[in-house]
Image (cartoon, grey):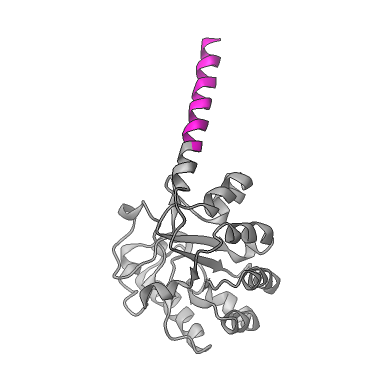
Amino acid sequence: RRIKAFRMKSIVITVIFIILLMFVFNLRMPKTVYLSFDTELECSSEDVNSVLEVLSSNDVKATFFLVGEFIEANPEAVRKIISEGHEVGCHTYSHPKMFKLDLDEKQFEISKCVELLNSFGVEEIGFRAPHLLLDKETAGLLDDFVYDASAVKGLSWFYPSVKKELKVSSFLGMPLMDLVGLHYVKMKTFWRFIMGNAYSSEVSLLFHTHFIGKRADFLDSVIKSYEGVPFKRHIEAFK
């Protein structure tokens, strides 16, 4: 009985602690919100259209980090993203874990994706490493990019330094991205609140186009929670 009572008290204390954190997290609205969508080969044109419809209905511009294989397979979707005023960035060619590759392979992954983006007239390009895993050798290949968007706030010790970066926002060390609360933890309501009430002067939220495109209501509700706050593309933070 004592063990059960202790466990119950621990649960109650944990819940109260989380609620307090939620209130602290929501003390004030941010000055700017940045939305990004990692767009990989498994993403369909329907997923892209679903996301674009939500962004358009809320008059919001965002950044799409594209994998080269997706660009090759879906050129019309890429053109539509660009034509609607959104930014497109480099997410490598085939979405590998970069730290597992040798230098030549890393150079190919980056240069091939950049080449494909250039073919659409895109010159100013940001970078995001697959899986948010940026190693030192890959970081050394980013000099020609406007910025890097691979790091997560609060985990700076885990990432090599880069000249210009826009970090993904976090909560208790977890990146504020859709997969955390909807796929791994599966706490939709709680995670909607967390992603929609981030406490920071600048908030950067990460979505996966193939995943959130099938859950447009979640994306829409997160965007609407920041009513009155300007949304910007990542590259605007460096101009």
Q: Main secondary structure of the magenta part?
A: helix
Dividing the picture into quadrants, the one containing residue 187 is top right
Q: Judge whether 81 appears above or below 47 on screen.
A: below
Quadrant assignment for the C terminus: bottom left
Residue 223 lies in magenta, yes or no? no
Q: Which is more toward the observer, 38 or 5?
A: 5
Residue 211 visible here:
no
Residue 55 at what x, y percent from top left? 61, 70
Q: Which is more toward the observer, 74 or 4?
A: 4
Residue stretch rendered in magenta on the structure: 1-19
Q: Residue at x 44, y 71 (%)?
A: 234
Residue 104 at what x, y percent from top left? 37, 75
In the picture, measured across the screen, residue 160 lies left or right of residue 3, that is: left
How many numbered marks have been drawn onto this rendered protein structure? 0
Residue 123 visible here:
yes
Q: Judge whether 30 appears above or below 21 on screen.
A: below
Residue 168 at what x, y percent from top left? 44, 59
Residue 81 at what x, y percent from top left? 59, 79
Q: Residue at x 53, y 15 (%)?
A: 5
